[in-house]
Image (cartoon, rainbow, N blue to C red):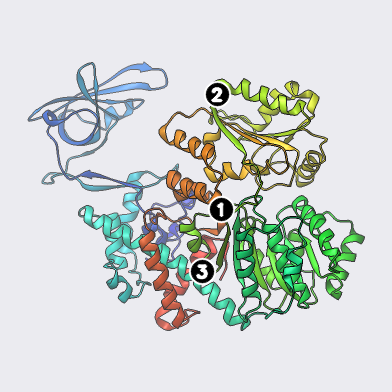
Amino acid sequence: MKPEDSVKTIKGIGNKKQEALLRLGISEAGDIPRLYPRSYQDRRKITGISGLYAGESFLVRARVVTAAAGRFVPKRGRILRLLVSDETGRLEIVFFNAAYLSKALEAGSMYDFYGRVTEVKGRLIMTHPEFSKVIPGTSGQGIVCIYPLTSGISQNEMHRLQKLCREELEEQPDFIPAEILEKYSLPGLKEALEGIHFPSDGDAIRAARKRFAFEELFLFQAGIWQLKMHTVQKTGGGICFDSDVDTDAFMQSFPYPMTNAQNRVITEILSDMRSPKCMNRLVQGDVGSGKTAVAETALYEAVKSGWQGVLMAPTELLAMQHFEGISAHFESFGIKTVFLGGNMKASEKRSSLEKIASGEADVVIGTHAVIQPGVVFKKLGLVITDEQHRFGVNQRMMLSEKGENPDILVMTATPIPRTLAVVLYGDTDVSAIDELPPGRQKIITRAIDQRKRKDAYDFLEKKLMQGEQAYIVAPLIEDSESIDARSAEGLFEELSKKFSDYSPALLHGAMKQQEKDSVMTGFHEGRFRVLISTVVIEVGINVPNATVMLIENAERFGLAQLHQLRGRVGRGAKQSYCILISSAKTDVAKERAKTMENSSDGFYIAEKDLMLRGPGEFFGTRQHGLPEFKMADLTKHMELLKAAGEEAKNLLSGDPLLSQENHRLLAKEVRKLFTNGTDVNL
């Protein structure tokens, strides 16, 4: 059996099983060994019945004395009760809704039962254990793998498939160089697969886990470094912008002085732009830290050096807001700015395209429309994307290909923990605007429980009576039977009467873009005073009159996301407030609330978020282009991550395209990861 063979070729896999396996990410035979166990059960030791105690899981080898189906219990079905015995005593075993098992469990036969023991009215009971008939001459069951499953595939079925692959699957060569494995004492691929699926002891599992964690990090870093080196080699260097351009005069034209952090980041950007290398820089900074002024300065440098610049934003409203502010500022310096969006009239769009192609337009500000095939630049030198995590790497590359190796600047108000910035942006230099302008008021944040919701709404109404505006954010679009949380639609229905004098509006991600734009424009213009929304407003527009952010079920949001939402207010001169309503009472919930109340530092909050929730929760689905690591844990494997990054960089410095014969397997795996697992294509 070859790794690339369809699972349909395996005996016992029909159409339904194939569909079920596809839900687990398994389409080929070689994918089966790459479905790793989610946990293990140590069934090596058989415990006598007299040695059992409540609160733990045990393996018991006992003979069935009696098996009787009892009365029907609502929600639990008909109960099957077994009495089993060994040399040390007797034990009651209970199965719910499983009367059919009475035929599978024969009185007088010996079985291994593995399950959790509880105490009920002074008696020890094992509830719904896994069981198997004893094979004569065996002692214990070894370490049993527990796999992540889906409907239609059982643990026994997955064990069968893993055993089949172990015996019949063609051995796959290792794509990690032997010298790297030896350097870090990592097992080879065959040994690691044996240790992960058929472990002899805990050491075998730990060694296999370490190898696969390293493998994931190594492949990811290799792909990132390959992308960076491939870009540099393909383009042969970047643009040298004019070092004589007087950016100081332009920076002094802003109505407020630059902060030390802004000056530092601008110096880093100008140093890149005026050097032969192609700039590829990420600028992180909280809402209100002055990223737009930094972007304007970079655009000014590009235009005054004889090039065009483009700024791409994720929504038409945000792009238009950038256009209105930047074009007015640039006009006094003789810089022509045009807008390009998807909802423009045909005549307006044609006019913008002509100005871009002729070079009459110095700066273009727009949405995804700027990367469409019909957009032709005369001399594009600088590409800037705002809220870059909303754009895939492929989209940024499409935009950069509009020019001949333009410099690239990406910006985000979503702080990434400093410890992870290098991982996520291994192909990018990172700058941080970690200082807010002086005089900016801190947003007063308070965490309350559900009992004080009325007080929160009364406070919000008081601010509305003073002419201010407010956001109310819910985690769900509509009410759900399975999730106990408030919904935007439910809140809108409930609060439309309470706040009827203030024209409440509803906004959520399932609405059409034109509807969303209409609502946001109405809120921006003050026609709607209360906006009831989901997190779709996380990246929004500037509404200085909005002073209250009330977030329902705050326990359902990450700290970094709460910080982003809080940043929607505090845009004007008035004191702003953020109210977090939560029903959670755990220590972690209290720690999260305390963090939000006491800190306004986005970088600190991001680090805390990562620590409290882990990387899977922190990044969310496919956010930031990060692949879904199965073994690697970015909070636990930082040393492994550094080692993997160093080895990937060293290997690629000698073979940037991984074209050497001994690196072709590695190249194949990197392409596979970056095609299926991220938004990057190599």
* Residue 596 pos. (x, y %): 53, 39
Q: Residues within 10 Å of mark 2 (few under 14, many from 20)?
A: some
Q: Secondary structure at mark 3?
A: helix
Residue 77, relative to residue 113: is it above or below? above
Amino acid type of disc 2? Answer: Gln
**Label 1, label 3: how far apart the Cα atoms are:** 20 Å
Amino acid type of disc 1? Answer: Pro
Q: Is residue 527 left or right of residue 478?
A: right
Residue 415 disc label:
1
Residue 140 sits in which quadrant? Answer: top left
Which residue is at 22% across, 56% downward?
Answer: 203
**Label 2, label 3: how far apart the Cα atoms are:** 45 Å
* Residue 254 pos. (x, y %): 76, 59
* Residue 60 pos. (x, y %): 17, 35
Kindly report which numbered mark, 2 or 3, lies closer to the viewer in this rendering: 2
Disc nearer the start of the sequence (1/3): 3
Residue 83, relative to residue 242: is it above or below? above
Q: Residues within 10 Å of mark 1 (few under 14, many from 20)?
A: many
**Label 2, label 1: how far apart the Cα atoms are:** 29 Å
Q: Secondary structure at mark 1?
A: loop
* Residue 281 pos. (x, y %): 60, 67
Indicate the quadrant containing the N terminus: top left, top right, bottom left or bottom right: bottom left
Which residue is at 20% across, 17% downward?
Answer: 122
Asked whether residue 528 appears in the rendered view, the answer is: yes
Direction right: furthest residue = 347
Read off the residue under disc 2: 450
Q: Secondary structure at mark 2?
A: helix
Amino acid type of disc 3? Answer: Ile
Read off the residue under disc 3: 224
